[in-house]
Image (spheres, helix red, strand yellow):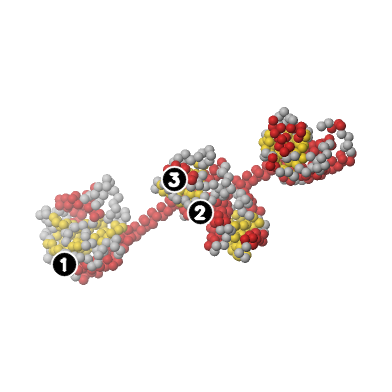
């Protein structure tokens, strides 16, 4: 356009232009709001020159320009970005651009034409093209004058400066916001750590995780798997229609790093496909000491955006904090549980020790020896010797089913029954039936007692006994023969009334020894999990039959100690031995 | 420190939950119970008034997320109002304004619900 050819620019117009520019400059410099600034640039230009449409594009990245503000036109025919080469200096009509040798410019011009834009004004800052203003023709259909173009170029210059400041401020604002977001993330992480470290309840820990996933990350679908006895099990599920399926095991167990399904990383096997189909797209390993202890599986977040790198790192931290808290909770629970068990066993031991006789009577012409060694778990072994008269003594040995406090309590019950019934001097089978009735009334079907008892008469030198399902005691004769005392009937506590008990009376000659014991003796375990065995016991008793009751007891105990080599025993070791001296 | 209470009242068919104090992971279960109580009564038009809430952490937003699906499935909504700048900032940073309608005043939020039912009949 030949500006020299125009003479119509009056002094009045110049003053008016200057006024409008000054006003625009003041307005723009008073704002840092980019939308407001761009809108004002367009409205000022359109108002001053009576134009009905305009658009502003700003540089998005090197030489790529993006539409930022639009007035009076629809953007249907415009692309969101355009590539524009450098080298623009003045306002130029679209007609001129349409004839440019540059493909990119011709493409841009064609789009402008389709929106009825007629003139394009470059926004220059230190000679660099930071944006362009596009305007339609005048409503009057009159051509643009040289003064109009000068005015628009001035507007563009004012605009460029204001835009630059606004962009700087916008950049700062965004930085600030990113910083705010980081602070927010950190706050959440701190809060979660604090919350998780003050509870040992896995439910509380998982709830805190839930809040963070939903509140901080806007994820509404997730599953947390944790490793229990080598298997990953879901412990927290928020996924409708989730059906646990063994397929996930294989996909998750080998997870070494975060896996995000996308068009770049599609499921590679049926196991992954199954997780993907269940709506889970982000799988995050939960590690303690580099060991996989669980997996955090997330569905799409509300709004649909992918997690960016920093969010994935954040999720990683969240996953690891959670699994550490869960592991700690488990350790604490185990410790408490172990302490509770130890306390219970201590109580059981106290009860048991209180029930065993403190001192044994010494029947004349006889020797009595007994031992009870409680195992770690405290079995329910019991023995007793009760003097009925100067020459009659009740001998009893029993093994209560179960261990710990329940067994100790049942033993207390049995001891009370024994001490009550024995002095009644009923025939032994009847007395045994009474014992059975008491135990039966006080226990469930799963609780019972194996029980052997007898009455030793030190004048008649006889032993009358009933064996209610107990390991048969051995009667060792001085001549080397031995026999088991098996006469009796059913164990105590199972059936009431029981089938009648039988009893037997055996004679004791000098040197005869009766050895009663519980299965902790015959079933003592070696380190190689071999049993001591009945046969070994019998052989041992027979070869040591001439020893005193105490020495025989010691020899059996020594033999068992040598056999077990200190291996922990699961049952009590109890023996009651009576020997006729003369 | 962790003092937090929820008050519930009715404005016609609309339930208003008034939050007061400090809402974080520790106090969030309280809000969870308040929401559950509304759902148990099949009240799905819920306005949450933040006027007296001094602090919210992401856990508080987690509770809102936890119930939003259920509420909307039942043709209801959770609308928010009277947020302080500090509280709003947390919602904004976490991208919640696109998920929830946030009003300056409780009246506007309630009116929005009442208009909805008006349109239905």
Position of A477 with respect to A66 (left or right) is left
Residue under numbered circle 3: A248
Q: Is A466 drawn above or below residue A29 in the view shown?
A: below
- Residue B29: horizontal and vertical position, in percent? 53, 58
Query: A214 above or below A466?
Result: above
Pointer 1 and pointer 3 on the same chain: yes
Query: What residue is drawn where x is 55% and y is 60%?
Result: B35
Frontmost residue, B30 versus B80: B80
Q: Where is the C terminus of chain A found, in terms of image quarters?
A: bottom left
Q: How many labels does the image show?
A: 3
Structural distance between the alpha carbons of marks 1 and 3 = 75 Å
Q: Which chain carries label 3?
A: A
Counting residues from the start of the chain, the first of labels 1 and 2 encountered is 2
Q: Which of marks 1 and 2 is in front?
A: 2
- Look at 41% across and 48% down and name the residue there: A228
| Among the 4 quarters of the image, the one containing residue A436 | bottom left
Look at the numbered discs 1 and 3 and tell me whether their residues touch, using CB distance below 8 Å. Answer: no
- Residue sitting at the far bottom: A424
Q: Image height check: is A153 above or below B98?
A: above
Q: Which of marks 1 and 3 is in front?
A: 3
Q: Return the disc, 1 or 3, that comes first in the chain's sequence.
A: 3
Question: Mark 2 sits on what residue?
Answer: A207
Q: Read off the residue under disc 1.
A: A391
Few, some or many C-alpha atoms within 10 Å of disc 1 (few <14, some 14-19, many ≥20)? some
């Amino acid at each position: 356009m030949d500006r020299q050819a125009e003479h119509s620019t009056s002094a009045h117009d110049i003053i008016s232009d200057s006024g409008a520019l000054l006003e625009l400059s003041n307005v723009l410099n008073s704002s840092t709001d980019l939308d407001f600034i761009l809108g004002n640039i367009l409205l000022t230009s359109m108002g001053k020159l009576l134009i009905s449409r305009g658009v502003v594009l700003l540089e998005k990245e090197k030489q790529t320009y993006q539409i930022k503000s639009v007035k009076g036109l629809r953007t249907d025919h415009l692309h969101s970005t355009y590539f524009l080469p450098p080298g623009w200096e003045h306002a130029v009509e679209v007609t001129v651009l349409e004839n440019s040798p540059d493909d990119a410019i011709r493409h841009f011009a064609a789009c402008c034409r389709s929106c009825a834009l007629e003139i394009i004004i470059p926004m220059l800052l230190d000679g660099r093209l930071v944006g362009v203003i596009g305007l339609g023709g005048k409503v009057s259909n009159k051509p643009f004058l040289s003064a109009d173009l000068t005015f628009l170029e001035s507007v563009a210059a004012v605009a460029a400066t204001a835009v630059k400041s606004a962009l700087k401020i916008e950049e700062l604002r965004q930085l600030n916001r990113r910083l705010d977001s980081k602070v927010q993330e950190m706050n959440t992480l701190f809060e979660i750590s604090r919350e998780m470290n003050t509870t040992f309840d896995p439910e509380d820990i998982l709830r805190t995780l839930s809040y963070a996933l939903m509140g901080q990350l806007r994820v509404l679908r997730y599953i947390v798997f944790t490793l229990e006895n080598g298997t990953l099990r879901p412990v927290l599920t928020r996924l409708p229609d989730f059906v646990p399926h063994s397929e996930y095991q294989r996909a998750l167990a080998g997870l070494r790093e975060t896996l995000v399904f996308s068009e770049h990383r599609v499921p590679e096997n049926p196991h992954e496909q199954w997780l993907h189909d269940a709506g889970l797209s982000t799988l995050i390993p939960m590690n303690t000491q580099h060991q996989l202890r669980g997996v955090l599986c997330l569905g799409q977040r509300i709004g649909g955006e992918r997690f960016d790198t920093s969010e994935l790192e954040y999720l990683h931290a969240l996953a690891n904090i959670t699994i550490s808290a869960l592991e700690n909770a488990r350790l604490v629970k185990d410790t408490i549980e172990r302490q509770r068990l130890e306390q219970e066993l201590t109580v059981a031991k106290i009860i048991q020790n209180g029930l065993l006789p403190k001192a044994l009577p010494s029947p004349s012409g006889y020797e009595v020896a007994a031992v009870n060694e409680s195992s770690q778990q405290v079995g329910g072994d019991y023995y007793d010797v009760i003097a009925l008269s100067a020459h009659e003594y009740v001998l009893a040995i029993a093994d209560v089913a179960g261990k710990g406090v329940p067994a100790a309590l049942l033993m207390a019950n049995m001891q009370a029954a024994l001490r009550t019934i024995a002095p009644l001097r009923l025939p032994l089978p009847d007395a045994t039936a009474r014992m059975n009735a008491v135990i039966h009334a006080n226990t469930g079907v799963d609780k019972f007692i194996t029980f052997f008892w007898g009455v030793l008469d030190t004048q008649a030198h006889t032993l009358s006994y009933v064996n209610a399902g107990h390991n048969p005691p051995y009667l060792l004769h001085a001549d080397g023969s031995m026999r088991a005392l098996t006469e009796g009937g059913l164990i105590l506590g199972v059936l009431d009334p029981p089938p009648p008990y039988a009893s037997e009376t055996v004679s004791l000659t000098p040197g005869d020894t009766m050895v009663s014991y519980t299965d902790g003796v015959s079933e003592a375990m070696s380190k190689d999990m071999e049993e001591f065995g009945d046969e070994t016991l019998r052989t041992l008793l027979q070869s040591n039959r001439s020893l005193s009751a105490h020495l025989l007891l010691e020899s059996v105990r020594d033999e068992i100690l040598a056999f077990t080599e200190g291996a922990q025993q699961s049952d009590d070791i109890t023996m009651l031995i009576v020997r006729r001296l003369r | 420190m962790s003092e937090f209470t929820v008050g519930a009242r009715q404005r016609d068919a609309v339930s208003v939950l008034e939050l007061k104090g400090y809402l974080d992971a520790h106090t969030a279960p309280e809000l969870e119970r308040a929401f559950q109580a509304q759902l148990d009564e099949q009240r799905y038009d819920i306005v949450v008034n933040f006027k007296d809430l001094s602090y919210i952490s992401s856990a508080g937003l987690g509770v809102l997320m936890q119930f939003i699906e259920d509420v909307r499935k039942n043709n209801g909504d959770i609308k928010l109002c009277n947020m302080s700048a500090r509280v709003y900032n947390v919602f904004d940073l976490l991208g919640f304004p696109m998920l929830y309608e946030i009003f300056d005043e409780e009246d506007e939020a309630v009116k929005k619900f009442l208009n909805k039912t008006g349109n239905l009949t």
